[in-house]
Image (cartoon, rainbow, N blue to C red):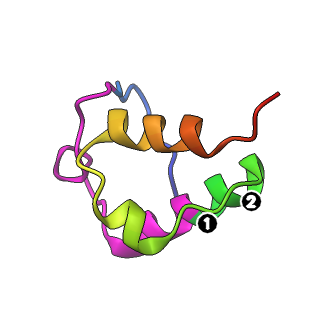
Amino acid sequence: MFRKKNFQFDMGMTAADIPGWDSLRHTILIMEINRVAGIDLSPEETAELKNLGALYDAIVTALPAA
């Protein structure tokens, strides 16, 4: 589902920049981030994120301190 050949991501990228992106893919991505990272980004929180850089910042902030 998320495999795109030769696709370059950058921190300023938005959902509109990713071909085929939709709310289902968004939900699945957030659920997987939460599961793999052991964090809990809420739907309300992620709805406010403007780009991949903001998502990255939210993940780093939610991670437990080492």
For residue 54: magenta? no
Q: Quadrant of residue 32?
A: bottom right
Outermost residue, front side: 65
Outermost residue, left side: 16
Q: Position of residue 1 (x, y in %)?
A: 52, 58
Q: Quadrant of residue 26?
A: bottom left
What is the C-alpha distance between the residues marked 2 and 1?
Answer: 6 Å
Residue of label 1: 31
Residue 45: which numbered mark, if any?
none
Amino acid found under the numbered disc labelled 2 = Arg
The residue range painted magenta reads: 10-30
Does 15 appear above or below 48? above
Mark 2 residue element = helix
Does 49 appear above or below 27? above
Q: Are marks 2 and 1 in contact (CB under 8 Å)?
A: yes
- Residue at image position (76%, 33%) is 65
Amino acid found under the numbered disc labelled 1 = Met
Residue 35: which numbered mark, if any?
2
* Residue 12 left/right relative to 7: left
* Residue 47 left/right relative to 55: left
